[in-house]
Amino acid sequence: MRKISVECPTANLDEYRRLAELACELGATHLSASQVELSMWQWNVNRHDPYPNWSLHRPTIFKYIVPEELKGYLPEDYAKRNLETLVKRVEILKEFGLKATFNGMEPAYLPEKVYRDHPTWRGPRCDQARRARTEYYAPCIDNPEVRSMYVRTIGELCKVAPFEHFQLMTNDSGGGLCWNDRLYPGANGPRSCRHIDIGDRVVNFLSMFQEGAALAGLEAEVNTRNILPHDVPAVLPKLKKGQSINNRTLTSVTSVEIVGFHNYYLDNSNPIARLARMSKIADHIQNIQGKDESNIQLAIRDLDEIDTIRFMKKYYRSMEKGFIGKYSALLDMASGFVGKENSETLVEAWELIEKVHDRFEPLDTGGHIFLLGTIHQRWLTRPLVAFPAELTPEEKNYYREFQFQAQTEEDADNMLDLQANRWLSGVGGFNLYRMIYSEAMPQLDAAIRKMSSLIGCAVDKEAEKYLTAQTAKLKAWKCIMTNARNVISFQFYLDGADYDNPPKDTTSVIGDQGDIRFYKMNEILRDEIDNTIELIDILKKADQPIIHQAESKEFENVMLLGPDLTEQLEKKISIMENHRRDLLRLFSSYNR
């Protein structure tokens, strides 16, 4: 049966009910039910190690039910909260006639003490060595005891939530299969299972979920992704009924077409919350037309994403192909916000947003710089100073705690060290970003002008709220891009500074400021302070989220900025002002 599934993160059961109503209206057959509370306990074991942050938001079987064998190793109260929420979600699904999908990661790493007490359970090392401060191991699912534990627990879970479709990620983010080349440290695992063929191992893995579901009287379909292309031919012939890898079976390719952005990691407008991406959404919807055999995932970033939701409701089942089809639909959509006479201006703004987005698309090395830099390295909230190692704990800890940095403190102080990769360092990175930035700014400024000009043309209060918010989000997006330019530029000049010798005055013209680098870096400092002031003003005036932030300080993490973002930005400005003249220890100036 063709699956039409809806995905959207929800904060509570009221939102989940609204999501179920929307799924029915969209003609969906399935709704994702596996969202979990952030598992902060995984990171709290060692807050000095950032690697668990890749796992905090990922659903796993033992985050719902802690089997008897793992009691004392995993928090039962946390699992109980997730299971209780899941039970209530299932009630809502039954009410609306929807089926539940499980989207998660397995086999996921377990605490080290599990393997000390049960050494034969230790499976592959699954961390990324330069991004973790310790080793993390997934359990070996070829071990009979581990496999039995999984099957039994999956059965218990499926009795509570009738999952008939499992979509699993493996070999990434703190999980993986033994002896798989996709593991970050390379193929590894216990000697006891090294002889097992890759096809048999993957089938054994997928069968665990089907056998568990069968204990609850269900016939489940299971797909796993992240299987390397060179392993696919060895696995396909051995797949059983209802099993697929990378959406493929031996006899067919079950295409899964996505409309929207189901993965924040792939949305390069992040950390802006729900920036309008209507031109891309229209492309997605055109792409699924005529693909009646394909499964469809309708991915919504938030239930307040009214532009995408409106467009999906009206067009995802039927939309004309080609240039005329796309822009006719967009013009029709825009008229619902600003009237037919102003619709072209709104479509032009949407199109400009996509052009700006595409200009920054190349700045991705396993993650876009607005994720790896702006958020993971806290570019947005950390101060630009000449001697970051000399900052006091009070000046530093508020951002350092949330940096993704598993190497030395010297590496952490280098703002261009993005998960142990400095590909933006040097004159090449400096010039690349500045070129992209300079080309994108005229288009972004034009989008801001067009969106802002339409606020007075809104057809109703909801449209006015949308246009006002999108204008603020575009301005904040510009601040984020400017912040990245300033960080890259500042670090570029720091990298060329002589930290071993005192600065010398080599200027000969009375009108010179001193060392040109001192002048340039002061320009950057001033611009970043002004940029931060502008962002603070945008955030304080907004009546809805402009930037993704944690719901409480408890849940701030490497992947998510804190709820006190404006206070952190104000603190950043104060620290930069206090340390502005530290540059004189590196560069000469007449004004000493």
Image (cartoon, helix red, strand yellow):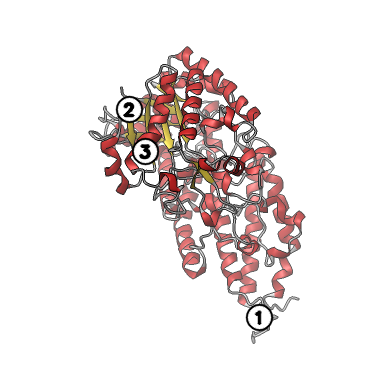
Residue at the spot x=48%, y=12% of the render? 95
> Could you classify mark 2 by the number of other residues whose Cα lies within 10 Å: few (under 14), some (14-19), or many (20 or more)?
some
Q: Which of 545 and 494 is in front in this view?
A: 494
| Tally of numbered discs | 3
Does label 1 or label 3 sit earlier along the sequence? 3
Image quarter (top left, top right, bottom left or bottom right) of the C terminus:
bottom right
- Between marks 3 and 2 in the image, the one whose residue lies nearer the viewer: 3
Q: Is mark 2 on a helix, strand or loop?
A: loop
**Residue 202 - label:** 3
The residue to which callout 2 is attached is: 242
What x and y, as percent, mark residue 530?
A: 65, 56
The residue to which callout 1 is attached is: 511
Does label 3 or label 2 sit earlier along the sequence? 3
Q: Which of 46 and 441 is in front in this view?
A: 46
Name which residue type carries label 3.
Val
Image quarter (top left, top right, bottom left or bottom right) of the N terminus:
top left
**Residue 303 - label:** none
Residue occupying the far bottom of the picture: 508
Q: Which of 427 and 456 is in front in this view?
A: 427
> Could you classify mark 3 by the number of other residues whose Cα lies within 10 Å: few (under 14), some (14-19), or many (20 or more)?
many
- Between marks 2 and 1 in the image, the one whose residue lies nearer the viewer: 2
Q: What element carries label 1?
A: loop
Q: What element carries label 3?
A: helix
Name which residue type carries label 2.
Gly
Note whether residue 307 is visible.
yes
- C-alpha distance separating marks 2 and 1: 77 Å
- Between marks 1 and 3 in the image, the one whose residue lies nearer the viewer: 3
Name which residue type carries label 1.
Gly
